[in-house]
Amino acid sequence: MVLIDTGAREGHDIPFRRFSRYGLIVTTVTVTVAAAYVWLRYFVLV
């Protein structure tokens, strides 16, 4: 939300829908990488 407010002050329009879409993609990639690490670390490379 701070990013949206800062962008608006600088003259950049960042719709909440676009912000949420990119945030969802980043969150999905981060959780996938973390899950793969935990799976490898604790179940494969015992």
Image (spheres, grey):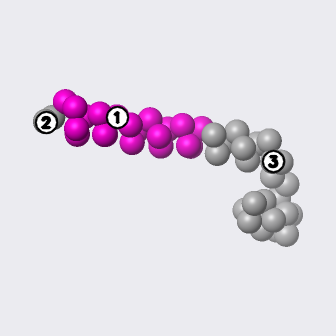
Quarter of the rendering occupied by the N terminus: bottom right
Q: What residue type is labelled 2?
A: Val
Which one is in front in this view, the residue at disc 1 or the one at disc 2? 2
Give left or right: position of 7 versus 21.
right
Residue depicted at x 29% and y 33%: 39
> Residue at label 2?
46
Kindly state the secondary structure of the residue where label 1 is placed.
helix
Residue 13 vertical placement versus 34 (above, below): below
Give left or right: position of 1 versus 41.
right
Which one is in front in this view, the residue at disc 3 or the one at disc 1? 1
Q: Residues within 10 Å of mark 2 (few under 14, many from 20)?
A: few
User: Is 38 covered by the magenta stretch?
Assistant: yes
Of callouts 3 and 1, the N-terminal one:
3
Q: Which amino acid does label 3 sit on?
A: Phe
Residue 28 vertical placement versus 2 (above, below): above
> Residue at label 3?
16
Q: Give the range drawn in magenta.
A: 25-44
Q: Which amino acid does label 1 sit on?
A: Ala
